[in-house]
Image (cartoon, rainbow, N blue to C red):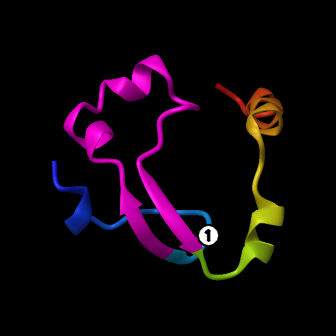
Amino acid sequence: MCIRDSDLLMPVAGEVTEVNDAAVDKPESLNGDPYGTWLVKILISDVGQLQDLMDADAYTQYLDTREH
């Protein structure tokens, strides 16, 4: 897997400044610690975009309103 040459879908605009090669080499590490393992670090272009993001609790509540 070559994350350096892939497009990323992100909810904010910015530039990738660092890649976690350990997670890229061993992607199953995400399963063991999904909130503690990072893939990329991003220099965000517009920090105001962060106000529109949901935290884990808000996302769970959102999912509860959707039909499964």
In front of the other: 53 or 36: 36
Look at mark 1 in the image and give the residue it sits on.
12
The amino acid type, in three-letter code, at marker 1 is Val
- Please tell me whether residue 36 belongs to the stretch shown in magenta: yes
Question: Residue placed at 42% from the left, 70% from the top?
Answer: 17
Residue at (21, 67) in percent of width and height? 5
The x and y percentages for residue 52 are 80, 63
Q: Quadrant of residue 23?
A: top left
Q: Secondary structure at mark 1?
A: loop
Residue at image coords 24%, 31%:
26
Q: Is residue 58 above or below residue 17?
A: above
User: Which part of the image, by quadrant, shows the C terminus?
Assistant: top right
Q: How many marks?
A: 1
**Residue bounds of the magenta highlight:** 15-43
Residue 4: x, y in percent?
24, 64
Residue 3 lies left or right of residue 13; in this view the side is left
Most distant residue in the bottom direction = 45
